[in-house]
Every structure is written in C-alpha cells, then in structure tokens.
Amino acid sequence: MEIAQFQQQLEDKGIQLNSQQLQQFERYYEVLVEWNEKINLTSITEKKEVYLKHFYDSISAAFYYDFSKPLSLCDVGAGAGFPSIPLKICFPHLHISIVDSLKKRITFLDHLAQELNLKHVSFYHDRAETFGQNKQFRESFDLVTARAVARLSVLSELCLPLVKVNGDFVALKASSAQEELEKANKAISLLGGTVQHVSNFKLPLEESERNIIVIRKERATPKKYPRKPGTPNKMPIE
C-alpha cells in the first residue's frame, strides 16, 4: 500500500490525516525497521506491506468502533505497538497504556513515543495475567484491545478483567474468528462480557479476511480471573 493509497483509503472511511500525522507514520516505519535489526519486532519490513498489514490493519478497528470520544485504552501484548500506536496517531486524544511481557519491546515503545512526540502514553513490562490482578489497573479502562495475541477464549481472560463495567473489549482477528468465537462464548459470559457485534471485511489490495469483534463488559469479572501466568493458555475456559 502506497502512502497516497493509505491516506485515501482512510479518508474514504472518514479518517483524515494531516501532514504531521503522515510524518509520524513515516517516522514510525523508519524506527520500526531500524530497531527490527536489533530485536525481533516484525517479520514484515517492506514499506508497502507495513503500511497495509500493520498500520492500516490496526486502524481498521476504528471503522467499526467509535474512537473519536475520550477513551482510556489498554493494549494487551501490543508488541511493536499494534493496534494502539497507529490508533493513537489518528486519534491523538486517546490515553494509551500498553502491557507487554518482553522488556526489549517496552524499551522500543518508549523510544518510539519520544520520536513521535506522543503524549498520554504509558508502557508496562508485565504479564497480562499479573497486570489484570493489579488493583491499580483492574476494571479501570474504557477499552481494551488485542491483535493477533492468542485465541479468543484465552484473550478474553487476559483482557476482560481490565475493562471497566460498561466498557468494551475489541479483538482484531483474521479468518478463524467465527470458530474462535463459538469456543470462547463460555469464557466471555463467565468473565462478564456479551458479544455486541462481529464485523467482517477484507484488507484492500491483498483481499485477506479480517474480523473486528466488539465485546461489551456488562458485569464485574470474578476475582479469580485472570488465573496465574501461563494457565489461561494451558487450560482455556471452553
């Protein structure tokens, strides 16, 4: 995806980028590729691919969820900052927190935030299971996002405990979303969530399938969740 295509496709969806925002995406790409030589952040490094499969793909959540309102957003397992940093560039008013278990990635994100001059961003080196039991953060976010981290039954246990009651969990998924959702229904309900809608679309140019799953947190999550680090993945609620 060329930069002009990226800009036009977003404009068609009602997201207009100014010159500063376009420069931030350019610098994001440069820093990503530069750091990727030192630490493994992504296997996708060609510019057109990064713009399509990382930047555009991350922002696609905003086609199906309203990011224009004031929101505190926690991104679980964001890695190199996806989807929250592209969303932050498009919607600068967002307050972003990222939790990731790898210290090197947190160091990268700290540097990236300085390079892009991002305000109201916080990065936490922690396991999602531990973070979700921390009273300071538990049930404190308007919105929690996750992209390509784990299957939905596992993700729900990592993310829903962080969402405040009447807040939302948005999962960005590829093609197996419906199958994952069927297996995750029990976990979602147990953890206090209700599926609001599933939006299916194809990435431009390459036509690969994508799904945005929006889950509303309607009840408080039982205190025992999330369980100890590693347990949700080994023994998912299904």
Image: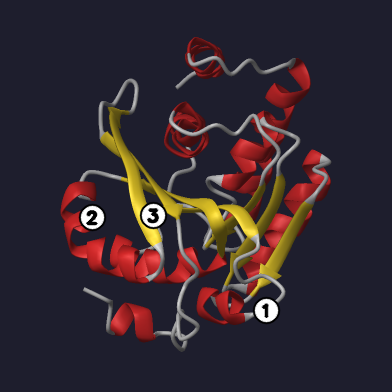
Q: Residue at x 27, y 84 (%)?
A: 235
SS label for mark 3: loop
Residue occupying image coordinates x 30% and y 69% = 187
- Residue 2: image location, x then y, percent: 50, 18
Q: Nearer the viewer, mark 1 or mark 2?
A: 1
Q: Residues within 10 Å of mark 3 (few under 14, many from 20)?
A: some
Kind of element beneath mark 2: helix
Q: Which mark is residue 202?
A: none
Give the mark nearer the N terminus: 1 vs 2.
1
Front position among marks 1 and 3? 1
Looking at the rendered structure, which numbered label has been put on residue 181? 2
Report the side of 90 relative to 165 (left or right): right
Q: Which amino acid type is shown beneath numbered disc 3?
A: Ala
Spatial separation of the CA atoms under disc 2 and disc 3: 14 Å
Find residue 210 and report its image quarter: top left
Residue 164 on image: x %, y %: 58, 60
- The mark total stands at 3
Q: Is residue 148 above or below residue 136?
A: above
Residue 104, given in percent of the width and then of the height, sits at 65, 69
- Displayed quadrant of residue 231: bottom left
Q: Quadrant of the N terminus?
A: top left
For residue 106, side relative to residue 82 (left or right): right
Find disc 3 in the rendering and name its residue: 148
- Foreground pick, 168 / 60: 168
Visible residue check, residue 151? no
The residue under label 1 is which amino acid type?
Lys
Q: Earlier in the sequence, mark 1 or mark 3?
A: 1
Residue 197 image-quadrant placement: top left
Instruction: State the residue position of label 1.
Output: 135
Q: Nearer the viewer, residue 116 or 168?
A: 168
